[in-house]
Each structure stands twice: as C-alpha cells, then as structure tokens.
C-alpha cells in the first residue's frame, strides 16, 4: 500500500531499488522536501525510470526535481525490468548503456556491454512507444554503441548535462503527446493548417499548409518558455489546440512579412508613371493606419461571404455577430438561437466557405 | 474605445472560420474529409509524418551540436528577426536555428567546443 500511495502522490519521490529485497517494490525512502511544481505539470505527475549507477543518478536527480518528475531508480538492468513491469508506463526511461546486469555481476571489459540495449529492447516489446534515452558517457559517439536497427531511434546522451537532458525530455513529451493523437485529432490539425493558410490569403510563395504545421511544431520544440518568444507548450493545454494557436500566429506573421516584401518590391519599381512623370517611391511606404485600399478589399471580401448566405438568415446572424465581435452566447441571445441551431449555422458557414471542394466554383459563389 | 475598421471585422470572421474546425465532432471531421474525396487514414498519416519529421529534425540538430561538445540552455533561445539564437554555455559561441531552413548554424557549428576539452579529445580520438 505504501508504494501505491507513493505512486499517486504528485510530489517527486525517490526510490532506490534494493536487489536483496523481495519482488515487492520497497517503500520510498524519506522523500525530500517537495519543490514547487511548475505550472505545466499540475494536471498529471510526470514519471521517470532511471537505470544507472549512483553517480549518474545524482547528476540526473537535480534535473528531474526541477522538471517536477517522480522518479524511480534501479541500479541494474534486472531491477530496471522489475520496476518497469510494476510501474509502467513512464514519461521517460533513462538507461545507462553499460548498466550492470544485476548487482554483484562481473563485467568483462573486453566484451561489448549489452545489458542496456537488452533492457531497452525488452521495454519496447512491452510498449513500443515508451520514450527511452541512453546515457553513454563512456563512449565517444553514438556509432560506438553499435545499436541494432530497432533501437536506432533512441536518443543517446554522450555528454550528460542537465541542459541536454532537459531538451530531450521536452522533445519526448511532444513525441508522447503526438503518439496519443487520434485520427480525428490529426485531421483537425491538417484542416486547421489549411484554414489558417486560407483565411490569411497565403499563397505558394509564402509556403504551404504542411510547412505552417511543421513550423508550429518546431516552435513548440524550441519552446523558450522564459522568453515568451517561442511557442512554449503548457502541458495542461491540448497539443492540437496549442498547435492551432501557433499556426494562427505564424500565419499572421507570414502574411505581414509578405505585405512588407510587397511594399519593398513596390519601392524598387521605376519611379516614373506611364506618362513619364516622376513619382516619389515614398508614396508606397506603409501608413500607420491600415490603408484605404486594404479596407476596401476587406469590405469586398466580407460582402462576398455575406452574399453566400443571403437565403440563410441564421448563418447571416452568426456572421454579423462575429463581425461585431460578439461572443457565441451573445449572438445566441441576440438572435434567439439555441445551442444546436447556432452550431448548425456555424457548420453551414464552414462547409460553404472552407470546404476544399467548394473552392472550385462550379457556377455558385463558394469559398473565400 | 479602439477605432475599428472593416479590416478588423473581416479578420474576426476569418478567424472564427479557421477555428470552426474545433467545433466539429470526430465523426463530422471524418465525414468532411471523406466528402472531399480524401482517405482519412492517408491524410492522418501525412499529418503524423509532418509532425514527426519536425521532431526528428530538432533532435538530430541538437545531437549534431552536442557531438561538437557544445552545451546550450534549452530555455535560452531568443528570437531575433525570425531567427532563434542561443549561445554555448561553455565557449559562448553563437548557435542559430531557422525554422525555414530547419538547420542549426552559427560559429558553434564550425567546430568543437574549445572549452569542453574532455569531449573534444574524445571526439578527436574517435577519428
């Protein structure tokens, strides 16, 4: 019971596996004072299994503490297997490549050490998606490890630093969230990428919807939570929603960049008009307010969307509500729409304006 | 009150349209994809590929940097005119990463970290 309680406790805990004990997991040795939990892990405690010698554990412990992990520690592969089968899954498993097979086992230094990779293979047989990292400080590069094909995807830490581990942990967190995405999630992401691309009026010159998604993912990995300049992913937030918000901001930035480039191109145009009169390129410089031209285009575009729904009063009401910056409940209240009718109107708007097929025209005015 | 132009109104409508994908249920999004003549599984696989490729790139670029003995603070990235910049904590060399090229560049990638002697010797010994 003690070990069960320790597992559900959200505070970081430490357990040193005792090889001489029975197969029951031992109770945790006195937990250290709980560090302040980062905001990002409030929803679910993160867990790690470290299978390594004591000095490596000492090094890694600080990092895990700072990142709010609950860790379990085994000093040899045998104990690692036992802890894994008792407590899996873990957010991450760190395996020292040359870890002892079992306590007291002798190492023949003239033979290649395989205990770490055998443990990794065993774990992947139980859960092929388990995030694993090899720690291999005794090696010069990852090629020296002679990893078999099925383990080549596992990241290797040669120079073991807290910073490198932190990068690997956050990358594994993203991989883990990706593995949990359903088909519908992935389709939603794809559609979100296409939608942001479309509504910003982007073209192949600026990129593609896939590139937009890829950039959102990379910015998530870069993180930069302290600077607020990356797209730090708060794990309390659904990854799909997070990536969509990232794409919203990136697509906006692409649009602005494209507009700036356009203005620069205009400045490079000949400075004489068709009649040969000198023109100042300064007239093309951006004004502090949105230009009258852009406003006119915007008006036409909005009018076009409204025209698509001349026969659909409820859709028109929703569009007007959006245009007036009303919240969904305000729109519903103002127009007397219940939740279902409101949702149905939104779906009709989406279908007519955003559907891939509708963009092709076909006589009726479709697409934006 | 902030002055609002039609541009704001247009943008709000377009933003709501882009977000409307999140108002579809799982069945509805699957149906929408099928209606457009695309196989949902293929489309989902394609999305997975894009996401995975970005993670693989990020991981391999970090490994390339680490193989040179450089250490960066993962929370130390700063965005400078669209390019992310960081510095090696040991030697101070610049590391930059552009999401457009998906590559790490900068002085740090020109050679081994001069301050990380042990690592550098290990690497050189392997050549």
Image (cartoon, helix red, strand yellow):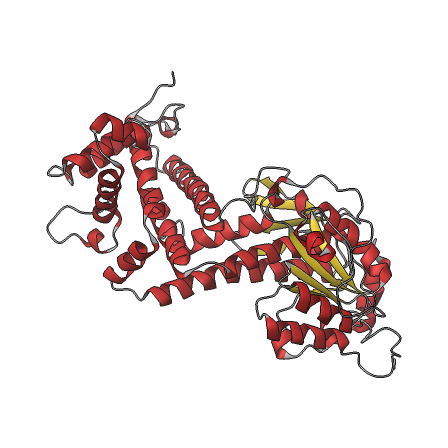
Estimate the x, y position of residue B34 in percent, counting from the top left: 27, 62
Left or right of residue A179: residue A30: right
Q: Is residue A31 above or below residue A262?
A: below
Foreground residue among A166 and A55: A55
Q: Position of residue A160 (x, y in %)?
A: 78, 59
Q: Residue at x 56, y 55 (%)?
A: A174
Query: How many marks do you count on the picture?
Result: 0
Return the x and y of residue A146 as percentages of the image width and height. Answer: 71, 78
Give the image quarter of residue B58: bottom right
Residue in the image at 64% along x and 64% along y: A88
How far across and how far down the image is residue A182, in percent? 43, 60
Quadrant for the N terminus of chain A, please: bottom right
Check the image and name the residue furthest to the top: B1
Quick check: A118 left or right of A207? Answer: right
Instruction: Locate residue A274: give its quadrant.
Output: top left
- Quarter assignment of residue A151: bottom right
User: Which quadrant of the figure contains the C terminus of chain A?
Assistant: top left
> Left or right: where does residue A13 sit relative to residue B5?
right
**Residue at the bottom extreme?**
A111
Q: Residue at x 39, y 51 (%)?
A: A193
Identify which residue is drawn at 46% across, 62% down. B48
- Given residues A30 and B69, the one toward you in this image is A30
Residue A208 visible, this angle: no
Q: Is residue A223 visible?
A: yes
A293 sits to left or right of A43: left
Q: Nearer the viewer, residue A125 or B69?
A: A125
């Amino acid at each position: 019971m003690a070990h069960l309680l320790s597992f559900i406790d959200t505070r970081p805990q430490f357990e040193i596996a005792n090889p001489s004990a029975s197969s029951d997991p031992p109770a945790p040795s006195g937990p250290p004072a709980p560090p302040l939990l980062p905001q990002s892990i409030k929803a679910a405690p993160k867990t790690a299994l470290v299978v390594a010698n004591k000095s490596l554990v000492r090094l890694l412990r600080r990092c895990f503490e700072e990142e709010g992990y609950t860790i379990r520690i085994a000093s040899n592969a045998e104990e690692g297997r036992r802890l894994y089968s008792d407590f899996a899954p873990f957010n991450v498993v760190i395996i020292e490549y040359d870890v002892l097979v079992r306590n007291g086992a002798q190492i023949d230094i003239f033979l290649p050490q395989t205990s770490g990779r055998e443990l990794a293979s065993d774990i992947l047989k139980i859960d092929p998606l388990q995030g694993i990292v090899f720690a291999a400080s005794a090696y010069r590069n990852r090629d020296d490890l002679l990893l078999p094909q099925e383990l080549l995807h596992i990241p290797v830490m040669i120079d073991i630093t807290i910073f490198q581990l932190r990068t690997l942990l956050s990358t594994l967190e993203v991989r883990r969230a990706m593995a949990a995405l359903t088909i519908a999630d992935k389709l939603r992401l794809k559609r979100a990428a296409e939608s942001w691309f479309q509504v910003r009026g982007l073209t192949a010159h600026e990129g593609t919807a896939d590139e937009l998604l890829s950039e959102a993912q990379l910015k998530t990995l870069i993180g930069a939570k302290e600077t607020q300049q990356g797209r730090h992913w708060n794990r309390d937030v659904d990854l799909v929603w997070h990536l969509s918000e990232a794409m919203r901001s990136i697509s906006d930035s692409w649009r602005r960049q494209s507009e700036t480039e356009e203005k620069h191109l205009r400045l490079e145009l000949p400075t004489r008009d068709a009649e040969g009169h000198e023109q100042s390129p300064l007239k093309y410089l951006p004004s502090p307010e949105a230009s009258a031209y852009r406003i006119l285009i915007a008006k036409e575009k909005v009018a076009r969307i409204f025209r698509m729904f001349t026969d659909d009063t409820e859709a028109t009401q929703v569009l007007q509500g959006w245009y007036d910056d009303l919240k969904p409940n305000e729109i519903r209240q103002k127009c007397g729409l219940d939740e279902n009718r409101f949702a149905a109107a939104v779906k009709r708007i989406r279908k007519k304006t955003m559907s891939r097929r509708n963009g092709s025209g076909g006589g009726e005015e479709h697409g934006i | 009150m902030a002055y609002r132009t039609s541009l704001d109104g247009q943008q709000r409508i377009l933003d709501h349209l882009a977000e409307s994908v999140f108002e579809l249920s799982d069945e509805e999004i699957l149906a929408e994809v099928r209606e457009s003549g695309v196989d949902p599984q293929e489309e989902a696989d394609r999305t997975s590929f894009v996401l995975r490729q970005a993670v693989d790139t990020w991981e391999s670029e970090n490994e390339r940097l680490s193989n040179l003995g450089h250490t960066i603070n993962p929370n130390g990235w700063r965005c400078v005119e669209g390019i992310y910049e960081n510095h090696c904590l040991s030697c101070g060399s610049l590391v930059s990463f552009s999401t457009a090229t998906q590559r790490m560049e900068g002085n740090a990638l020109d050679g081994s970290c001069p301050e990380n002697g042990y690592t550098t010797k290990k690497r050189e010994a392997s050549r």
